[in-house]
Image: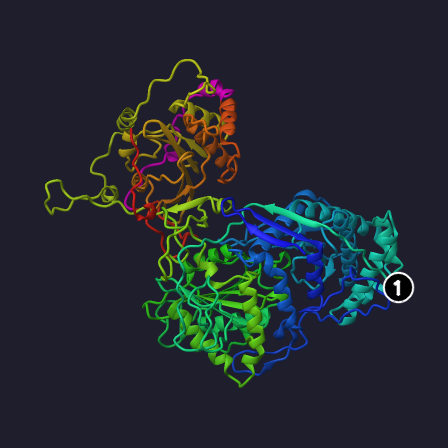
Amino acid sequence: MEWHVEVDPQSGTARIRYDLEWLLAVMSVSATSMVPFTFFSVGKAKGRSFPSRSYPRSDTPGFILGKGGLDSASRAGGRHHVNGASVFELCELFAPGTKDLEIPLSDIAIQSKRAVCVEVLRTYKGKNFRLSGGTPHRDSRTPDWQIHGYPMLCIIGGPSKVFPKDQGEWRALQCVFGAVLTQELRARALGIEVVSREGFGSVFPTLADLPDGIRLDPGLLPPDKGAAAIAAALTVTDQFITEMRKLKVPEAIGTLNGYTALALEAVDRLMAVLHDHALNTPRANASTYAAAVARYTGRPAECALPPVKATIAYEFPGVLPLAKGPKMKRLLESEESGYGSGSEYEDEAPPTPKKRDTSDGDEEVATPEGFTVKKISVLSGMAALRMATFYGMHYSKALFSASGSLKDSGLTGTQLLNAWAPYFELDHEPIYQGIVSKNGVRMLVMDGAPNPINIPSEAIPNQKRLGAVVIDTTNNTSSEKAEYLAFFQALLEQAPEPKKPGGLLFMVDSASKHPTGGDLVHGVMRVCGTRVSVRAFFNSFLKPHLTLMSNSAYGLTVLDENETLARRAMLENRLVMRNGDLFRTGGNASPGGSELGGSNLGGAEEAVLPRPIMDLPLLARRNLGKVRRVALRALQAQAPADGSKKKVPSASAEAWAEPRKQQDVSSLKKEFEALGSFEAPSQEAPNLQAPGYYYEEDDIYNLQRYLLRNQANVAVLPGVSGPQWRQMGRAAYTTGVNPAITTDTEIIIQPLNRGGNHWALLYITLGEPEPFGGRRVRLLYLDPLHPDDIPVEDLRLLQLPFPGIEVEHCTLQYQDDNDGALLRGQDSCGAWVVHLAVHLVLNGHVLPPVSENRRAAALQLRQNHNADIAAARALALPVAPGDVRLHVLEPRGGPALRRSASLGSLPSLASEHQGGKKKPPSFES
């Protein structure tokens, strides 16, 4: 059997390889695990006895809310492992290919499944249903944070008076789609079989119900070939609906309605009939499938799908491994509580304990600043969701209304319970109504990757102070969870005193629909906040609940000894995420890069290895791994030259002061231009392809203006020299100095000359005007030849025209004009500066990939630019608008262009000097 997953640390490309023998072994074990299912690739099915399936929950419910009794409703129990031994069997099957992964398999599976869904949506067009999945949810009501793509394909029909009009008929459609897709996958040597499994995610394709629709988890299908197979099956399924509307639906289809074991067995019976039809009908199509369904009597067929031998191998970009930096020291419990372990380091196997370890090894982690993540694993995802919701409400209530809490925050007595795309079976409203006194409840419930059927129509206001935020993060990657951690830290209410508790974020992973397979996870509730907040929750709310009734709450929700060992096996084999993964999404100690938690968590001193970057990008999420943050220190006042102690105002302080005298902008512009004039351009268009020719200032300026001439929101500026740059002031990016800049400008293109013979690029974006004035300003700095040579000290001057500017730099090297062992001059920086600016504007700020042959790419750029240079030089220079209301003026009276809440690293950025040693060079004339 073959199974291997790896991620290239340089390119961030994931490579997955497995054969169908391994996949069949996984299916065989899973078929008798948490939720049994039927599949037909196991031999002749004479006298088949279909396994009993429970839907939607386990038949052993049990959950306690507060001090009440046992909730015996099916929703309270969730799904439990039927056969615990199967978990260890599955871990043994996965371990050879995943044990050494630096990110959990779940991260890779999520992104692979999304890629399949996105490709299906791109290529398939039908008429009887619509598709959803894969892409981030975008809606006019969407809050300010990102709701990520759902890693399943949803086929949604909506209410109907014709076929399919009820659950039974949609399940018949599900069977047809499953049978057709099975044949498409087998014909392409991509899979074995598509099974009906109540929404459980896995590495093999599974089907489940949606209200007025069906849902496909594509498993680990190759995005391109898998999407082609799915699109082909959808085409037949769409035509099948049309054909069925011409026929009478048989009464036997009615037996597919409901959630009983008999209804699910009826689904398996119909699936057997349709597989048999496919095997015995060489030219099966939508019409023949409709005829087979129309004559269905409720009896199964004796079918067995023949074996298929094949190896599936594919890769896809954009999956970055977590960095291996210095070890992260754990914060151990002060007492043995059953939540901690004896291991000191997240990335090491725990040492042999002196006494038997009672935890799974996924320990609490915290930053030196005290931001803490602590988790509890429970038997089911529903238990974790209800636990987080119920106790999040009570914690919030105590936080804002109880004695000694935040009663003076101005929020006492307020009531707030918002739900954005909540887990659609979570009973958060009844839980809320069950609270006797609701004063002070300030809570948000949301889903990080929503099922498209459960998005409410009302918008959620951007709450600035919340007691609790609960997110179902089952289908979010580690870096996306870290993003939520960073975003909501700024929104959670902080206590007026450091030793008082504040708001908490609860990130919950459920035990079903998980990308690695529902058999391989438990319900997990991660509690995130300040250390005192996390301690207050565990000690005052959760532990009393677990020990409320002897052997009741604890036994019904928390993992027992065998489940704990299973959880440890899942973690050790990198099938699920660890707490520490949240704190290793930053870059190393280079300009602007830091661990999510600010710095390493102590521990042994080791040499920091070069490692990939996962700073959250400022401009485009697709730039993840390609950019690193740059922290700019505030401009400082300089000491007087005579050594006196007289205070000298800094440039920034002078900038905020009221202007002593209104300067003549026209004179300032002339003086500014005179400081850095280049050689006068020739009258004839240059030959940009000539050997050894490097782009002059006007070449870059004219080409960028020409190629972006239809972008009214883009201001292209001439290149600036060292002396010009050092004269930076508040008026540097105003309409008076640069007529191309107006109030409509959203992007500024500014080439920079470094050392007199090299070009870099400033790509500046201006956000929407903010309520209190100013705009959010962000800079992407690009040096095509030396991407890590960041002139931090010079970039600091941008705080004058753009107070609060946020900066990141590109880490990719686009330029390399050397040809093998033959060293040539590096002459193509100007061509790359032109190309990068144009590409970023036209592609939503997304960086282009690096060419495999950078020299050939540069020659092609020169050839393309040479065809445009004559027309580019003929463009008229920009003229400032006559309407002065469109003019951009210098910032006055304070930081009008202030920094907004960022999705950056928590809680602070690293030093801007790489490694804290060598100071980057300043611009030279």
Specify whether residue 21 is painted magenta. no
Q: Is residue 245 visible?
A: no
Q: Nearer the viewer, residue 438 or 471?
A: 471
Residue 637 position by quadrant: top left
Residue drawn at x 34%, y 41% as measured from the top left:
802
List x then y, in percent, for residue 621.
Answer: 50, 47
- Is the stretch drawn in magenta largely helix, strand or loop? loop
Q: Amino acid at mark 1?
A: Thr
Report if residue 172 is visible in the image. Answer: yes
Quadrant of the snapshot with the N terminus: bottom right
In this picture, is 616 found above or below 824? below
Q: Which residue is mark 1?
A: 297
Which quadrant holds residue 87?
bottom right
Q: Up-down: is 506 above or below 657?
A: below
Element class at badge 1: loop
Q: Is 63 or 431 nearer to us in this picture? A: 63
Left or right side of 754 for 360: right
Residue 292 is situated, as x and y percent measured from the top left of the image, at 87, 56
Residue at the extreme top of the image, as rendered: 684
The percent position of residue 500, horizontal first and vertical second, equals 35, 71
> Could you say which is closer to the camera, residue 195 or residue 165?
195
Q: Is residue 886 magenta?
A: yes
Q: Which of these two is toward me, 271 or 234?
A: 271
Instruction: Give the quarter of the figure containing the C terminus.
Output: top left
x and y, in percent, of residue 392 in the image: 48, 70
* Span shown in magenta: 866-894
Horizontal side of residue 865 vs 451, given as left or right? left
Q: Report which quarter residue 537 is drawn in.
A: bottom left
Position above or below: 527 against 889:
below
